């Protein structure tokens, strides 16, 4: 049974991409909501399924092999008022690494790598404002969390149940802490690729760990610390200039403490990028 964690060297090419010219985009100390990379995230993100639920009664939401039990014992608004009426539920199970990449999400929690079996996003709102449960939200899991065999465009419900859980909504990682998180990865890209237009990820399939690398303004590089060692990884970069998309991909061995990778992305269509991520 998996347990619940709450969120909040030598290389070779995975695929051959032809480098394409890119107008220079400066690195920034803080990425704004109007930056090209923010627009790329919005473009890639999924439309998460929604439904209406009466919070006066307990309901069980089915997300593949995960059951999510919403308590009927009352919820609280951001102003501290009690609420038991109709609310909007938004939820999705992410069962492929490429799906998490499309959400610009990773599985490093407070700097520690998490070996994930599945990831769930759950949001309960009224009038666009988030609600907090007074009682715990319960979760149960099946034997196979990464089956990828359920329908994403609708929410399914089941009979009520009651299990221990958590006192909030948001991102939930089902898995366990990965051992050996002592390695540092640094990724550099050609001029013009910056934290303002690019996101970089490291997927370690043997460890089931996904890292969203952080852009460093001073070194003009992307990096992640605390990665588990002795594992093969796929390094992926996604770039948007507003008019064109770029994809970089390369395999690497994560070991020895310090790992440095130089990526050379090339132009691709948005359809090619999304298909690549779905197959990752």
Image (cartoon, rainbow, N blue to C red):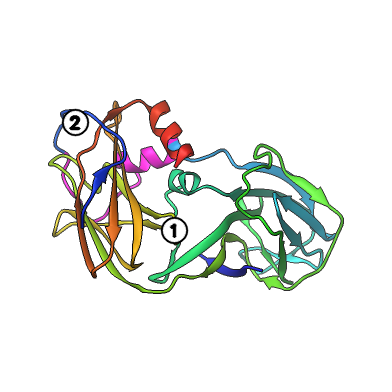
- Quadrant that contains the N terminus: bottom right
Decide which of 246, 59 is in the foreground and name it: 246
Q: Is residue 280 magenta?
A: no
Q: Which residues are magenta?
A: 25-43
Residue 197 to residue 201: above or below: above
Q: Nearer the viewer, mark 1 or mark 2?
A: 1
Task: Decide if residue 13 is on the left or right side of residue 21.
Answer: right
Residues at marks 1 and 2, CA–CA distance in whole angstroms: 29 Å
Q: In what element is the residue under mark 2?
A: loop
Mark number, residue 104: none
For residue 94, above or below residue 185: above
- Point out residue 76 in the picture as x, y percentages from the top left corner: 69, 66
Question: Which residue position is annotated with label 1?
Answer: 206
Q: Position of residue 168 (x, y in %)?
A: 63, 66
Count the numbered circles shown: 2
Mark 2 Cα shell of 10 Å, populated few (<14), some (14-19), many (≥20): some
The label shown at residue 19 is 2
Q: Residues within 10 Å of mark 1 (few under 14, many from 20)?
A: few
Q: Is 39 one of the magenta-colored residues?
A: yes
Question: Which quarter of the picture shows residue 5?
Answer: bottom right
Judge whether residue 34 can be spotted in this image.
Answer: no
Q: Residue at x 31, y 27 (%)?
A: 268
Front residue of this view, candidates 128 and 278: 278
Q: Quadrant of residue 77?
A: bottom right
Q: Position of residue 174 (x, y in %)?
A: 58, 63
Could you tell me which residue is drawn at 23 percent across and 37 percent down? 265
């Amino acid at each position: 049974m998996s347990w619940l964690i709450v969120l909040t060297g030598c290389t070779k090419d995975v695929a051959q991409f032809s480098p394409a010219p890119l107008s220079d985009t400066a690195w920034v100390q803080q990425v704004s909501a109007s930056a090209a990379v923010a627009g790329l995230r919005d473009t890639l993100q999924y439309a998460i399924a929604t439904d209406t639920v009466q919070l006066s009664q307990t309901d069980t939401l089915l997300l593949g092999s995960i059951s999510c039990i919403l308590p009927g014992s009352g919820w609280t608004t951001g102003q501290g008022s009690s609420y038991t009426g109709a609310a909007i539920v938004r939820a999705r199970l992410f069962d492929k690494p490429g799906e998490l990449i499309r959400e610009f999400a990773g599985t490093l929690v407070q700097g520690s790598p998490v070996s994930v079996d599945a990831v769930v996003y759950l949001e309960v709102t009224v009038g666009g404002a988030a609600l907090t449960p007074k009682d715990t939200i319960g979760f149960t899991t099946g034997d196979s969390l990464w089956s990828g065999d359920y329908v994403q465009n609708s929410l399914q419900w089941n009979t009520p149940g009651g299990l221990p859980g958590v006192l909030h909504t948001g991102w939930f990682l089902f898995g366990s802490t990965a051992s050996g998180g002592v390695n540092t990865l640094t990724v550099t890209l050609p001029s013009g690729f910056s934290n303002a237009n690019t996101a970089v990820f490291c997927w370690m399939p043997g460890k089931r760990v996904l890292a969203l690398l952080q852009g460093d303004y001073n070194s003009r590089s992307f990096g992640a610390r605390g990665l588990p060692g002795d594992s093969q990884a796929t390094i992926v970069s996604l770039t948007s200039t507003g008019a064109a998309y770029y994809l970089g991909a390369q395999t690497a061995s994560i070991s020895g403490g310090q790992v440095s990778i130089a990526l050379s992305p090339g132009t691709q269509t948005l359809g090619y990028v999304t298909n690549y991520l779905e197959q990752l």
